[in-house]
Image (tube, rainbow, N blue to C red):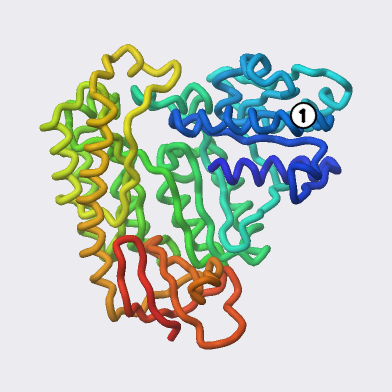
Amino acid sequence: MNAHDSEKVIGTLERQGYAQVDSEEAADLLLYNTCSIRDKAEQKVFHRLNDYKKLAKAGKRFAVIGCVAQQEGEKIFDRAPYVSLVAGSASYRRLPELIARVEAGETRVTGLDDRQTEETFETEFTARKNPYRAYITIIEGCDKFCAYCVVPYTRGKERSRGSESVLEEARRIAGMGYTEIQLLGQNVNSYRDPTGKKSFAELLAAVGEVPGVRRVRFMTSHPRDFTRDIVEAIDAVPALCDHVHLPVQSGSTRVLRQMAREYTRDWYLERIAWMKAAKREISISTDVIVGFPGETPEEFEQTVTLLDVVQYDAVFAFKYSPRPNTPSLVMIDSIPEAEKSKRLQILLDRQKEIQKVNYERHLGSTLEVMVEGTNTAREQVVGRSSQNKPVNFTWPHPIAPAPGSYQRVKITRTFPNSLAGEAV
């Protein structure tokens, strides 16, 4: 999502006559797009800003945009006095105007919006830098207020684009030659068409039926708004990829309640059962937080057993870290860092065993792979299956296939995180 925000910012500024350059040294203006979803990401922001000090002496202008900008606001000017512009994601439409003020000599320009903003950042001037996958934001913001999450405070309330606007962009993208589209949103399946014409599942199906589109992905879904008709759409429309990312965060109902996730373990597993019963085999991935305040060893074990029940194809797991303004800040974070690290490793080790078995099922099969590039060190072409599994394969010709093309690959080797084979 941050990558697509950057595409839209670049396209908007290029439309105003700015030109993107290849290095920080060659730039007159540097825009630093930031993320604050986890403490580690936020700390990287300030480390990088510190590195920019030497460039500031050359008279360059700096802008900090995105979630850390919205969260920290004018405090960024105090920590990095050479920054001239701070703008949250809801202010990206106004960037040309804000940058004009910087060019006019203002040294502390801000573009910050409160949570109630109705603005969405739709632009037909997106500079699509990905050669094989095109992104479309269909909903911005979040109304869920999970106890650990800063997103509702940095991205504003949920606000959806009209379905016709989304489909118009999808048709335009397909006309540019893109065959894979990924629909984006903080909670993408919380989409509510302001025109009332289409549900999320209906919009999914409609994008999948746009001429020229071969693959449609979406992320990230919230279990609370995950409905059976989404699975039915995946079954009915071949272009919808057979992969769903459904973050669970914890396998314990009590911890889920403390997290304010608005569902139980059983509720979540019911949605998993819908996908397991689908006509197509749907690959499932998830996010997990270990060491949430008050999580007992027994509750952590419930998360580990959830992996066994669901049999995820991928798990993105992280240690809990407190975030500014979130309700979990008042909870006692009594779990030592060493214990959090231990739990994280136990979880990752168990998931590695599960993935090893899951990926071995593909041995001997032939998959359609969309090419993403080449690994010159291993002399392999790199791509991804419709289930979002990385596939590396040998190519019998001197010139590698182009990114965005589709190749049939026979799987000859499997690993816990990828598949390998040879082009058919």
Q: Secondary structure at mark 1?
A: helix
182 vs 199, nearest the viewer: 182
The residue located at (77%, 40%) in the rendering is 13
The residue located at (74%, 42%) in the rendering is 24
Residue 274, compared with residue 140, is above or below; it is below
Q: Position of residue 138 (x, y in %)?
A: 53, 42
The answer to whether residue 254 is left or right of residue 240 is left
Q: Position of residue 6 (x, y in %)?
A: 64, 42
Quarter location, residue 352: bottom left
Quarter location, residue 283: bottom left
Q: Position of residue 277 (x, y in %)?
A: 20, 59
The residue located at (19%, 45%) in the rendering is 270
Mark 1, residue position: 56
* Image quarter of the C terminus: bottom left
Q: Residue pushed farthest top? A: 330
Q: Position of residue 312 (x, y in %)?
A: 26, 53
45 vs 11, nearest the viewer: 45
